[in-house]
Amino acid sequence: MPNTLVQRVTAGMADDARPWSRRAACAGKTQLFYPSAGERPEARAAREVQASLVCAVCPVRTPCRQWAREHREYGFWGGESEDDRAAAGYRVRFPSTTRSPKRAGPHRAA
Ligand code: SF4
C-alpha cells in the first residue's frame, strides 16, 4: 500500500502504456505553467513555485523536461522555467510577448 504522495502518484505507472504526456500531474492546470499577460516578476516567482510542487511529484518529469528542452518550449515544464532551460543551453528560439501554449502539451485539460 503506497504511503507517501510520490508513491501514491506513481503507483501502477510502470505498467501504464499511455504516452508520457497523458500521464501528466499537471493536466488541467495550464494557468500554473504559463504566465498571464503582464505578469509581474513576483507573481511569476510565486506561480512557478506552485508549478514546481506539481512537477516534483509527477511520474513523467524526466521525459517532460527532455521534451521541453529539445523543442525549446515556453512556460514551465519538467520542473524547469524558461530561465532554467536557457541556463542549461536550451533557450527559446523565438522570444515572444505572447507567452501562451502554442500546441497541445501535458498541461492541457485531460
Ligand atoms: S510540466 Fe511536466 S513534469 Fe511538470 S507536472 Fe506537467 S508533465 Fe509533469
Image (cartoon, rainbow, N blue to C red):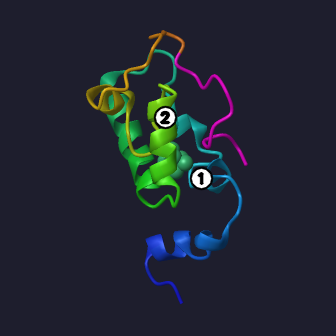
Secondary structure that dominates the magenta span: loop
Residue type marked 2: Ala
Disc 2 Cβ-to-ligand 1 distance below 8 Å: yes
Span highlighted in magenta in the image: 99-110
Residue 19 at what x, y percent from top left? Answer: 68, 52
SS class, disc 1: loop
Q: Image point 62% across, 43% down: which residue?
A: 106
Pick the front one: 65 or 110: 65
The disc at residue 4 is none
- Seen in the image, is 87 located left or right of residue 65? left
Q: Answer with left or right where residue 99 lies relative to residue 82.
A: right
Task: Based on the picture, tell me whether residue 102 belongs to the magenta stretch.
Answer: yes
Disc 1 Cβ-to-ligand 1 distance below 8 Å: yes
Residue plotted at (54% across, 12% down): 98
The mark closer to the camera, 2 or 1, is 2
Q: Which residue is under mark 1?
A: 24
Could you say where residue 95 lies in the image, as x and y percent from the top left? 44, 11
Identity, as a three-letter code, of the amino acid under mark 1: Ala
Residue drawn at (47%, 52%) of the image: 61
Q: Is residue 15 above or below residue 72?
A: below
Q: Indicate which disc, 2 or 1, sits on the residue closer to the N terminus.
A: 1
Q: Which mark is residue 68?
A: 2
Relative depth, front residue between 37 and 4 = 4
Say few, some or many: other residues with alpha carbon within 10 Å of mark 2 (under 14 / 14 to 19 / 20 or more).
Answer: many
